[in-house]
Amino acid sequence: MDNNKPTRLEVAAPGPLTVKGSFTLIGADGREIRIDEKVKADGIHLCICGRSKHKPFCDGSHKQG
């Protein structure tokens, strides 16, 4: 992956925050959550509704109303 590629954030309403590009994800415990560079390029989906059982990642719970 090109580390000079800008980070892109996309907000879906209602839905997750999608992050693509070069970034480091730090968990609530202060540790880095390791994510494969290919996955980063395609994008990860972070929960912003608070309902996910797999935080910080979205599990689609926002669709359940």
Image (tube, helix red, strand yellow):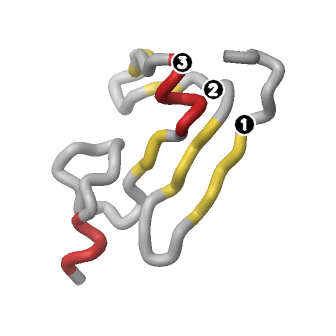
What amino acid is found at the position of numbered circle 2 in the picture?
A: Phe
Q: Which residue is mark 1?
A: 7
Image coordinates of residue 60 in percent, x first then y, are 27, 62
* Image quadrant where one finds the N terminus: top right
State which tag comes first along the sequence, 2 or 1: 1
Disc 2 element: loop
Q: Are marks 2 and 1 in contact (CB under 8 Å)?
A: yes
- The disc at residue 37 is 3
* Image quadrant where one finds the C terminus: bottom left
Going 40% across and 21% down the picture, which residue do you hit?
33
Image coordinates of residue 6 in percent, x first then y, are 79, 33
Q: In the picture shown, does residue 56 fall above or below 40? A: below
What amino acid is found at the position of numbered circle 1 in the picture?
A: Thr
Going 36% across and 66% down the picture, which residue do you hit?
49
- Tell whether 7 sits left or right of 40: right
State which tag comes first along the sequence, 3 or 2: 2
Q: Residues within 10 Å of mark 3 (few under 14, many from 20)?
A: some
Q: Which residue is mark 2?
A: 23
